[in-house]
Image (cartoon, rainbow, N blue to C red):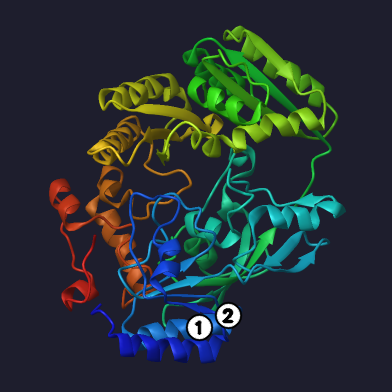
């Protein structure tokens, strides 16, 4: 996209303000700086405008304007994404959905809710909690992240092991397509007819359009919950405990692992009661019917002891349970006390490979002269190595990126994948050939072109760059904007 002249920029700003209302358009460089990246701060790009629609019709009008002007556009929620998925192109529009944050309807009889995309994940559970319901997908950032952003990345969370990821809880979507048309994908039923286009849209990382209303399932709160903290002197023992619990036919709602560096960071920040000298801790939660719950908890405790746990503690009450979860869910924030910056990795491996892969992660990061903290969803093999670094030190960012790439290769080598819940975005697109063939990628690209033929909707994400394709022996196809000389992948 050619840079806008100042006169053209002012003209477009006036046009959008007339449409959206005063205070709904940002174009001052200082204001735009806030939206230069998401939670992955390694990559930055500045848009021409950040706009704040309040309705689907507003979003449609903005998308049509962008198409008319040949401007790239990208939707943005709370900006908590960790793969650069909502990074703007250089120029164009960032369409912030944070003013579309309402819970529009709750149908308790049919166990569904209709929300706007900017609804904060946890706020939905707060809204339906007094009636004994909750929304199951719970990313660790659920106090801030939005349900629209969760849909873009098909986010998971600690309770994915039992309840699945976001797509398992979405029934239908009102979507503004990249040409501005407003359509419904799916609906309010759990057995829709025709193609599962809502399922296709979830996880498309904002490249198929912009969701403006979302129909989600809500669940009844479980009768009983038991939360166990198991403490280990060796991280291998904790890894073996995960497999031992599953091997007993138990499916906990969550099994989260926290390593020593993370435990110490959390204890310094919040004092949640984790033993500071432990090599690793497992936070295990079971929920469901009250009948038999204590027996399940006893079997989990036995499995942990048999694999070497030095201490196994059952949360005595809800206050202690919440404190233990506070440590887990606030771990990323705690890293901020011990490092100026960190890169959150997101890979998936078979559970049985946990000891082997964790050793390799530590070896790779140490070889690059860096530190790593591990806090992750052990039950479903979704790793989150957090590589700590100081961006002020020359060359340190490059070493972080190199270490991250090596970790993703290890995940692929053991039969895993390069993303569990954060999406591919900008961060991992060059690693797509590790897990997808040229034919796989071409099929995905054709689906994308069917929704997004001009490529203006969130360009430059998911698909590998020219360099990565050449290294993998794949044919690289120019994006239509690249063919016209209007854009290039970065």
Figure quadrant of residue 187: bottom right
* Residue 286 in sight in this render: no
Residue closest to the eye, 193 or 281:
281
Q: Residue at x 61, y 71 (%)?
A: 99
Q: Are marks 2 and 1 in contact (CB under 8 Å)?
A: yes
How many marks overall?
2
Query: Secondary structure under badge 1?
Result: helix
Circle 2 sits on which residue?
A: 56
Circle 1 sits on which residue?
A: 60
Image position of 65 with respect to 316: above or below: below
Crowd tier of the residue under label 2, counting other residues whose Cα lies within 10 Å: few below 14, some 14–19, many 20 or above: many
Q: Position of residue 377 (x, y in %)?
A: 54, 34
Query: Relative to 262, is 208 on the left or the right?
Result: left
Image position of 171 with respect to 274: above or below: below
Residue closest to the eye, 131 or 441:
131
Crowd tier of the residue under label 1, counting other residues whose Cα lies within 10 Å: few below 14, some 14–19, many 20 or above: many
Spatial CA span between label 2 and label 1: 6 Å
* Residue 64 in sight in this render: yes
Query: Relative to 470, is 322 on the left or the right?
Result: right
Query: Relative to 320, is 186 on the left or the right?
Result: left
Query: Secondary structure under badge 2?
Result: helix
Q: Residue at x 51, y 67 (%)?
A: 197
Question: Which quadrant does the N terminus fall into?
Answer: bottom left
Question: Which quadrant does the C terminus fall into?
Answer: bottom left
Image position of 343 with respect to 432: above or below: above
């Amino acid at each position: 996209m050619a840079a806008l002249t100042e006169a053209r920029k002012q003209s477009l700003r006036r046009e959008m303000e007339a449409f959206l209302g005063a205070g709904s358009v940002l174009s001052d460089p200082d204001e735009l700086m806030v939206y230069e990246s998401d939670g992955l701060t390694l990559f930055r790009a500045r848009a021409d405008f950040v706009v704040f629609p309040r309705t689907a019709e507003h979003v449609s009008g903005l998308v049509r304007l962008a198409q008319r002007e040949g401007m790239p556009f990208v939707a943005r929620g709370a900006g908590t994404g960790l793969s650069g998925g909502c990074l703007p192109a250089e120029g164009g529009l960032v369409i912030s959905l944070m003013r579309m944050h309402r819970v529009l309807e709750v149908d308790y009889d049919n166990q569904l809710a209709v929300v706007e995309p900017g609804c904060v994940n946890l706020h939905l559970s707060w809204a339906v909690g007094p009636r004994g319901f909750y929304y199951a997908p719970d990313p660790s950032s659920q106090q801030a992240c939005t349900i629209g952003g969760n849909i873009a990345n098909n986010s998971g969370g600690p309770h994915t092991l039992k309840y699945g990821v976001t797509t398992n809880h979405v029934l239908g979507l009102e979507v503004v397509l990249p040409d501005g048309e407003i359509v419904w994908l799916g609906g309010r039923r759990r057995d829709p007819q025709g193609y599962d286009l809502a399922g296709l849209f979830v996880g498309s990382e904002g490249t198929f359009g912009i969701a403006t209303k979302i129909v989600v399932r809500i669940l009844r709160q479980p009768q009983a919950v038991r939360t166990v903290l198991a403490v280990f002197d060796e991280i291998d023992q904790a890894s073996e405990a995960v497999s031992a619990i599953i091997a007993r036919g138990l499916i906990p709602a969550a099994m989260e692992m926290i390593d020593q560096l993370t435990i110490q960071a959390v204890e310094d920040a919040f004092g949640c009661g984790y033993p500071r000298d432990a090599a690793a801790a497992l936070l295990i939660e079971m929920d469901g019917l009250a009948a038999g719950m204590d027996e399940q908890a006893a079997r989990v405790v036995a499995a942990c002891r048999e694999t070497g746990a030095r201490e196994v503690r059952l949360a005595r009450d809800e206050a202690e349970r919440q404190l233990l979860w506070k440590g887990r869910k606030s771990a990323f924030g705690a890293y901020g006390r011990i490092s100026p910056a960190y890169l959150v990795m997101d890979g998936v491996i078979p559970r049985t490979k946990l000891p082997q892969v964790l050793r390799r992660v530590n070896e790779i990061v140490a070889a690059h002269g860096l530190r790593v903290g591990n806090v992750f969803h052990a039950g479903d093999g979704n790793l989150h190595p957090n590589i700590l670094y100081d961006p002020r030190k020359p060359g340190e960012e490059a070493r972080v990126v190199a270490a991250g790439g090596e970790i993703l290769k290890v995940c692929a080598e053991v039969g895993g994948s390069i993303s569990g819940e954060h999406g591919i975005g900008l961060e991992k697109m060059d690693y797509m050939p590790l897990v997808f063939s040229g034919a796989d990628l071409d099929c995905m690209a054709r689906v994308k072109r069917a929704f997004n033929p001009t490529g203006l909707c969130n360009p430059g994400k998911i698909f590998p760059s020219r360099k990565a394709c050449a290294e993998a022996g794949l044919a690289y196809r120019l994006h239509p904007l690249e063919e016209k000389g209007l854009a290039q992948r970065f």
